[in-house]
Image (spheres, grey):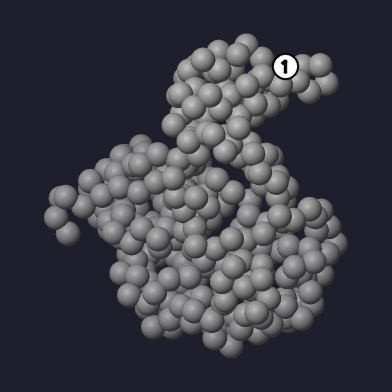
């Protein structure tokens, strides 16, 4: 790769320092914007669309109305809730230009997503390198789906490896084999999601079937020799049946090896408020699984896989 690869860009909606999930040690997690899946329970709905999006937070709005005159589309008007005024955005008129964001003194408006270069992201990662090294941590690329941007993702991983940073990728693995091969030669740990073992059900829940996903996971582990931690978002009423958890554990043990870890990730409701800030509603309305239910699913998976944990 030439030095020009440092100028490749992709949409990023968050860079989280001091993360203790998504891989070993303390990590910097880079969240890429844009995803080919449409999971009904998505915890980061702002990650689905690749472009910038306006997010508004009614609880922060003071009703000062400073955002109204700066909107070139006239998309912002005043409304009331329980007698309290707030600025309401007509999503059909709003083009996510962000003109209203600097006008808001209370932080009730922000744009999610900005184009960043490999160099800009790497500088953020290396600023924490002392903590990453001391903890055995590194950089994790998450999303959205980073495989949508193979040039950027390959370049960032390559640059991180050259800087001595441990690399991990959290991914749906819904991608072509050529992209998988390009990306995972620079990956120390794969963190693929397995959302459902039945392909037809998987398509209903996420919008895509699972055969390519499962084949890619096996390829990453068996052919590319990259270790993986299988991550299962546990969504009540969707994929938390005994049959599905058992099938996931059997797939892991048979195709990847019984030493391959499984992380059971309990559903949480943080996506609900994010959807509201985007002017949308969740496709699902469910309660998180109980601790007892999670422990029972863990025990089921442990019949086939040696290392099963709740949370990731």
Q: Is residue 19 above or below residue 173?
A: above
Looking at the picture, tell me which residue is in the foreground, 269 or 72: 72
In the image, taking residue 181 as reference, residue 219 lies left or right, namely right
x and y, in percent, of residue 254 in the image: 59, 88
Residue at (60% x, 32% y) in the render: 90
x and y, in percent, of residue 127 in the image: 36, 37
Element carrying mark 1: strand
Report which residue position mark 1 lands on. 85
In the image, taking residue 53 as reference, residue 150 lies left or right, namely left
Specify the farthest residue to the bottom.
254
Decide if residue 91 is in sight here.
Answer: yes
Residue at (34% x, 66% y) in the render: 183
In the image, taking residue 30 as reference, residue 254 lies left or right, namely right
x and y, in percent, of residue 181 in the image: 33, 74
Q: How many marks?
A: 1
x and y, in percent, of residue 232 in the image: 64, 67
For label 1, the crowd category at 10 Å Cα-Cα, with few meaning under 14, some 14 to 19 and many 20 or more, is some
Q: Quadrant of the N terminus?
A: bottom left
């Amino acid at each position: 790769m030439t030095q020009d690869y440092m100028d490749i860009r992709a949409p990023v909606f968050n860079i989280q320092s001091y993360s203790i999930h998504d891989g070993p040690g303390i990590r910097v997690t880079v969240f890429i914007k844009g995803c080919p899946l449409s999971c009904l329970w998505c915890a980061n709905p702002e990650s689905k669309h690749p472009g910038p999006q306006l997010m508004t937070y009614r609880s922060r709005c003071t009703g000062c109305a400073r955002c109204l005159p700066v909107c070139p589309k006239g998309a912002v008007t005043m409304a009331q809730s329980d007698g309290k005024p707030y600025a309401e955005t007509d999503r059909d008129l709003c083009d996510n230009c962000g003109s209203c964001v600097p006008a808001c003194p209370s932080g009730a408006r922000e744009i999610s997503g900005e184009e960043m270069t490999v160099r800009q992201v790497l500088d953020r990662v290396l600023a924490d390198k002392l903590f990453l090294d001391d903890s055995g941590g590194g950089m994790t690329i998450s999303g959205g789906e980073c495989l949508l941007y193979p040039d950027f993702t390959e370049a960032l991983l390559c640059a991180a490896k050259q800087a001595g940073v441990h690399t991990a990728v959290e991914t749906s693995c819904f991608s072509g084999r050529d992209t998988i091969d390009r990306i995972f030669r620079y990956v120390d740990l794969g963190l693929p999601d397995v959302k459902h073992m039945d392909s037809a059900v998987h398509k209903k829940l996420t919008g895509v079937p699972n055969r390519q996903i499962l084949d890619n996971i096996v390829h990453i582990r068996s052919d590319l020799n990259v270790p993986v931690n299988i991550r299962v978002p546990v969504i009540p009423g969707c994929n938390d049946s005994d049959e599905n958890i058992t099938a996931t554990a059997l797939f892991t043990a048979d195709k990847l090896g019984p030493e391959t870890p499984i992380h059971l990730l309990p559903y949480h409701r943080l996506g609900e408020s994010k959807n509201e800030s985007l002017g949308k509603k969740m496709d699902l309305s469910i309660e998180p699984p109980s601790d007892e239910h999670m422990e029972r699913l863990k025990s089921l998976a442990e019949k086939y896989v040696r290392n099963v944990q709740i949370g990731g």
